[in-house]
Amino acid sequence: MGPASHFLGIKIETHPDKYHLSQSSYANSILQLADLTLCNPLANPSCTKIPSQTSDDHPCFDQSTYRRIIGSLQYLTLTRPDIAFSVNMLLQHMHDPAAIHTSLLKRLLRYIKGTIDLGIPITRSNLLLRTFSDADWAADPISRKSISGFCTFLGDTIVSWTVKKQTTVSRSSTESEYRALAAATVDTIWIKRLLSDFLIPHNLPIDVFCDNTSAIALTNNPVFHARTKHIEIDQQFVRDHIQNNTIRLLPINTIDQIADIFTKPLSTTRFQTLRSKLTISSKYQFEGEC
């Protein structure tokens, strides 16, 4: 059938030793559904300070349209990890979206309007896995549950990312970080096994980067175990894989923590910096590098 150019709404730009995956046509269809094809673009999909809600606020979308748009945006995140956090936050209010949530959805769509051509580049590089894990402790103002975020790179290409609210309330930032680490470890091991099915062995320990010094200390110092029994299972799971040389837990400066983009709303400058570290780029940037 020849080289692939489109697959399930994903456009595949092919160049020597490079590919670029994007969903610009699909993103345009979402903007048409929301009647925002002529809206003014924004540079940030979320805002660090949520605007206050009043009883006079008029929703930007009705509940049915809100759900349809959010469902469509879930599929768009296949090539747009930069919007994964915003989509996840809005998904939590599908059952009863308030006016403020429809306003935040409109903001996200305006960001997509300005970044319609962004996508994921796939370039020739080494086949070493590395994972970045982070958590925002007690991020949910109502339930006080934390947000886990992690992403995995195969060489220079991002191949997996996750944004998820933790199922239980963490009693400390260390606990929330450890729960995120355990989930990231499971995902990373699954990718390693998948690569082995493709006859791509990964014999070296996989580097997992974490910016919480307490969590890293707990993996190396069993003296702390008596004071952290409430996270003993996750702790032992991560420690076992470190001792078996499956993963290698490494410290990273918070400024360089790429997974930060999956756990909280960020300032525009910080957001754009981390987005570039995710290697997300437009097809025009991609073509210029060829």
Image (spheres, rainbow, N blue to C red):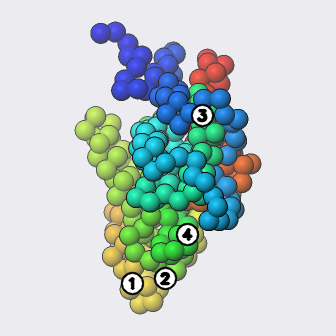
Horizontal and vertical percent position of residue 267: 71, 54
Numbered label attached to residue 206:
none
Vertical side of 259 occupied by 138: above or below: below
**Earlier along the polypeptide chain: callout 1 or callout 3?**
3
Numbered label attached to residue 139:
4
At x 39%, y 65%, the residue is 182
Horizontal and vertical percent position of residue 213: 58, 72
Numbered label attached to residue 230:
1
- Distance from Cα at disc 4 to Cα at disc 3: 30 Å
State yes or no: discs 2 and 1 in contact (Cβ < 8 Å): yes
Q: Quadrant of residue 39?
A: top right
Residue 96 visible, this angle:
yes
Horizontal and vertical percent position of residue 51: 68, 61
Please tell me which residue lies in front, 170 or 213. Answer: 170
Q: Quadrant of residue 222?
A: bottom left
In front: label 4 or label 2 = 4
* Classed neighbour count for the residue bearing mark 3: other residues with Cα under 10 Å, few (<14), some (14–19), many (≥20): some
- Distance from Cα at disc 1 to Cα at disc 3: 48 Å
- Distance from Cα at disc 4 to Cα at disc 2: 12 Å
Disc 3 marks which amino acid?
Leu
Numbered label attached to residue 171:
2
At x 70%, y 35%, the residue is 40
**Earlier along the polypeptide chain: callout 3 or callout 2?**
3
Disc 1 marks which amino acid?
His
Furthest residue to the top? Answer: 2
Q: Can you identify the residue that label 3 sits on?
A: 36
Disc 4 marks which amino acid?
Ala
